[in-house]
Image (tube, grey):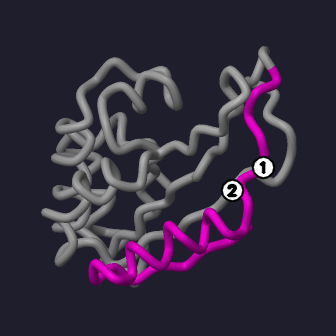
Amino acid sequence: ITNRSQLQHARVHQAIKLMHTMGGVVGFKLDAGSDAEMRVVNDSHLPLALHLQRLATCCDLCTTWVQTAVLSRLIDGNTITTPSLAAYLQALQPLKDNITGILLYGIARPSHQDDAGYIQPTSEATLEQFAGELRAQGFQVRAFN
């Protein structure tokens, strides 16, 4: 599993290539479909385009599954799901033929990073909606809740 932070380094490329020769698989963590979601979910100020570029590199080096936590956040009485399905699809669509598949999951326990107490368990219906739309767009998907 990678958080993609070191994928610009040649030594990391070599390690991923070695994993590939050994039949390994990379889990590439990506929980957002836009720069704003990257800031909210991962506290990352790097542009999503950079993460997608690193995903493309990873896919070229080894079998790669994208791992995405689908989070439901209660904000001002409204449930907001992150990533936004439309933004997530738009971000991954150009890489569809390179990504082996997508692993979707919700949170299994209360978040300890959630000072405001607003992260909620994602419903199975929401995960299935995400999975169904991704499958309709040609992605292989496994969903876990």
Q: Is residue 33 above or below residue 46?
A: below
Residue nearest the viewer, comparing 46 with 125: 125
Determine whether, in the image, residue 144 is placed left or right of residue 57.
right
Residue at x-position 50% and y-position 67%: 130
Q: Is residue 25 above or below residue 85?
A: below
Q: Is residue 26 above or below residue 42?
A: below
Residue at x-position 71% and y-position 31%: 74
In the image, residue 95 lies at what x, y percent? 18, 65
Q: Which mark is residue 51?
A: none
The 10 Å Cα crowd at callout 1, few under 14, some 14 to 19, many 20 or more, is some
Determine whether, in the image, residue 65 is placed left or right of residue 128.
left
The 10 Å Cα crowd at callout 2, few under 14, some 14 to 19, many 20 or more, is many
| Type of amino acid under label 1 | Pro
Q: Label 2 belongs to which residue?
A: 106
Residue nearest the viewer, comparing 23 with 68: 68
Q: Residue furthest right?
A: 109
Q: Within the magenta stretch, is there residue 135?
A: yes
Which secondary structure, mark 2? loop
User: Which residues fall within the magenta stretch?
Assistant: 117-145
For marks 2 and 1 on the same chain, the one whose residue lies earlier in the sequence: 2
Asked if labels 1 and 2 touch by Cβ distance under 8 angstroms, the answer is yes
In the image, residue 105 lies at what x, y percent? 64, 62
- Where, by quadrant of the figure, is residue 140 drawn? bottom left
Q: Label 1 belongs to which residue?
A: 121
